[in-house]
Each structure stands twice: as C-alpha cells, then as structure tokens.
Image (cartoon, grey):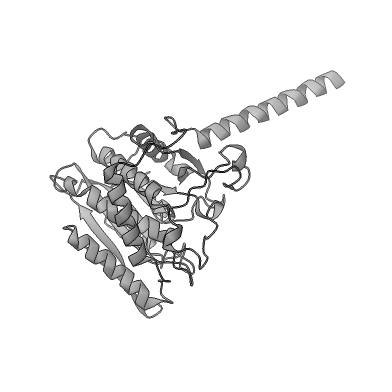
Amino acid sequence: MKRRTAFTLTALLAGMAIVAVAGARYLTAVPGQSHQGVLPPSSDAETATAARLLTHIRAVASKPHNIEHYDELEKSARYIEDTLSALGYRPVPQVYEVEGRTVRNIEAVIEPARPDAATRTIVVGAHYDSYDDTPGANDNGSGTAAVLELARLLADLRNTGDKRIRLVLFVNEEPPYFQTPDMGSHRYAKLLAERREPVIGMISLETLGCFLDYPGSQKYPPPLGLLYPSKGDFVAFVAMTGSRELMQSLIGSFRKHTQFPSVGGVAPGFVPGIDWSDHWSFEEFRYPAVMITDTAYFRYPHYHKVTDTPDKVDVGKLARIAHGVARVIREMAGPDWPAAASASR
C-alpha cells in the first residue's frame, strides 16, 4: 500500500510539473530569435529619427499635462495636430466632455488603395496625457513621439495597401480615468465596435525609452522573473491570453526585421502590468491588442514621478524600435500577414 501511495504521489507531481511546463511554454513561447550582443550602430535614418523624437517629447511632455493641468494638455494636443498636419494628414478629433472639460483623441488615417466597408483596419496608438503632476516624458511622451514618427515613416503607404491604418493619440489613459468609460482609448474602441469596423489588431506603444544593461535592473510580477531576463535592455511585446496569436505574429515580424533585444508573452489580465495601457480598451471590445513597452514600473525608476523628464528618454534606442515597428506595420498592411491575426475573436 505504501509503495502504491508513493507511486501515485510521484505520478501526480510529475503530471503537475508537465502541466506547469506546458503552461509556461504557452504563455512565453514566441517565434524567432532575440538580438544578442552589442547593438549595431544607428543608421543615418535612425539618427535623424532620434532627433525628431526628442523634439516631440520636449514639446508634448516637458510639463504635467492632463485635465488637472488643462492648458498644458491643450498645448500637447495642438502640437500633435500641427505635427500631423505638417506631414500631410488631416487630424480628426474625437471630442468628449469629462468633468466639465472638453478633451479629445486625435486620429490620422492612412487609407488603402480601394477602401470600402470591408476594409480591414490596423490601429496603432499611444496616450498623450501624463499622470498627476509628472511631465510624463517616458510615460508616455515616448509612445506619443513614436506614433508621430510612424506617421512620417509610413506616409508613403497612403492610397497603396489593402488595409487601413489608424494612428491615434489617446487622452485620459492615466488615473483617475484608467479602465473607465472616460478613458480615451475606451471611447475610441467603443466607436469602432459600434460601427463594426474589422480591426485585425491594435498596437499600444507605452513607455518605451528606458533600457538598462546590468543584472537585476529588470523586475517582474511573480513568477515571471523565473522565465525572463534580469537585464532591462529589451523591448517587450505583452498581451492578454486572448491576443496570443497577434503577439506572436508581431514579435516574429519585429525580430525578423530589427536588431534589438526583445521578449514576448501573454498572461491573464489579473497579473500586474499585463493590462496597464490602452490595449486593455480594445480587449474589452474583443479586438486583439498588444502592448509594446519597456515594462515601465518594472524597470523605469522615474515612473509616475516628477523626475520623468525628457532627458531620461533614450531616444537612440527608441528610434531603433520605431523603425522596427514601422517595418512590422508594413508587413501587417500587406496581403500575406498571418491569418492568425484575425479580424476579431
């Protein structure tokens, strides 16, 4: 009897171990190989992009800008609109009222060659408001600047591809509006869902300018630290479990085109950090969505502090990532994008 009990316990533990390994692989397995070793020098195009990124970050995120700092929020919004206009776009505001203040999302659209009601859509967005009394240079001036540079890098796709690309700067991502109906991306995703727009994927660019190359610089919510690197030198592709196929497609494309360290994974939304950006809103309306990030709170020492200023953002590495994401979107907008990234779930 003791021998049989011991055998049963051993089999149970072995089975649990197999399930744990299989589960971890499901959550963390991604295609391709992350870049390792010294980064190649920046190209001339990346160097020029880095300079423009810094200009955008200084203009949008040198001072606190949110409803409590409304004049600065308006200045940031006008800069975004003026920049998009200068690039040949027609910025479209999505205006709404919150606490007696008029706020807006800002959209620029790259239409395909033959748009119609069945045209599939890619959404690429970032929030442009800051938290409380912080300037928000990395969170999220970095993401805002990246979207503005993507507008430049992808401008030649206007009236050419077979998918619509919506570039959107969202208001009110930060508390107290985070994950409420007054969150800008929630308003925007709801609008797309109401008109039944077939979104094949949403990319949220969130806090993208901090990279640290020493052991222990990267933290994680338990137990993810057992599965990922201890150096915070990578960009992360993060999604909830329902968007696993999109996450894999995006990081696979990025790794194919871009020499920069990267990790990817999915987890349930209750894991801290997994749903901490505008991709959450699109998940709420059953659109696949992925956050691309430097992991913010888990790496960046100035997160939600008054020290989150433009000088803290590594615009050289941000430029490399922006060019990489532009290549991903080009592939995504083409006819051969993986069918796994379906219109909606």
At 43% across and 30% down in the image, what residue appears?
Answer: 31
The image shows residue 290 at horizontal and vertical percentages of 41, 46
Residue 90 appears anywhere in the view = no
The image shows residue 37 at horizontal and vertical percentages of 47, 33
Q: Quadrant of the N terminus?
A: top right
The image shows residue 207 at horizontal and vertical percentages of 44, 55
Residue 309 vertical placement versus 198 (above, below): below
The image shows residue 340 at horizontal and vertical percentages of 35, 35
Residue 70 appears left or right of 151: right
Q: Which residue is nearer to you in this view: 73 or 250?
A: 73
Instruction: Tell which residue pokes out farthest to the right in this image.
Output: 2
Residue 158 appears left or right of 208: left
Residue 157 vertical placement versus 136 (above, below): above
Instruction: Tell which residue pokes out farthest to the bottom in this image.
Output: 100
Residue 21, by quadrant, is top right
Residue 182, by quadrant, is bottom left
Residue 243, by quadrant, is top left
